[in-house]
Amino acid sequence: MDTSKQPFRKSKQTFRRRPPIGLGDRIDYRNMSLINRFISEQGKILSRRVNRLTLKQQRLITIAIKQARILSLLPFLNNEKQFQFKRAQSISRTTGPRTRQNRHIPQLTQNFNSNRNLSSD
């Protein structure tokens, strides 16, 4: 029989992924190599579905990440590029000429002065 006409068959070998947390790994705020695997590039904690963790492991990882943030071992947000970009924009805005003026303030003083003149008459 020609091999091109045979139906597609799945291989009998099962594909097993490596567990994200090994048996010897201790979930602790000091274990930065472990914690960094469960944080996105922006510094957010990845979901349990993405991490492939059990509920208990996810809770322990979340507590460890929060403790590391409080002790300044991890940043709360990791958006240095975005921060520098926003900072550059805000600096360029403040150094330019002011085009818009507060027009309502002189009107208020004029109204106040005109009311004052009317009440004195």
Image (spheres, grey):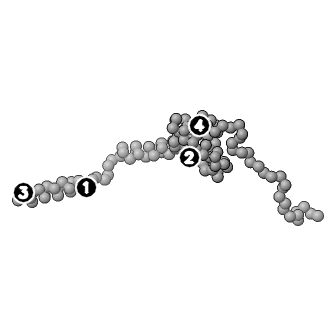
Q: Residue furthest right?
A: 1
State which mark lies toward you, 4 or 1.
4
Label 3 SS: helix
Residue 116 position within the rendered picture, expressed as x and y whole percent measured from the top left: 11, 56
Residue 7 position within the rendered picture, expressed as x and y whole percent measured from the top left: 86, 64
Q: Are marks 4 and 2 in contact (CB under 8 Å)?
A: no
Q: Earlier in the sequence, mark 4 or mark 1?
A: 4
The residue lying at 66 percent from left, 48 percent from top is 53
Hey, what amino acid is under mark 1? Arg
Compared across the picture, whether 37 is left or right of 106 comes to right
Which residue is disc 4 drawn over? 29
State which mark lies toward you, 3 or 2.
2
Q: Earlier in the sequence, mark 1 or mark 2?
A: 2
Q: CA distance from mark 3 to mark 1?
A: 27 Å
The picture quadrant where one finds residue 1 is bottom right
Which residue is disc 1 drawn over? 103
Which residue is disc 2 drawn over? 44
Q: CA distance from mark 4 to mark 3?
A: 73 Å
Label 4 SS: loop
For the residue pair 77 and 23, the one nearer the viewer reads as: 23
Q: Earlier in the sequence, mark 4 or mark 3?
A: 4
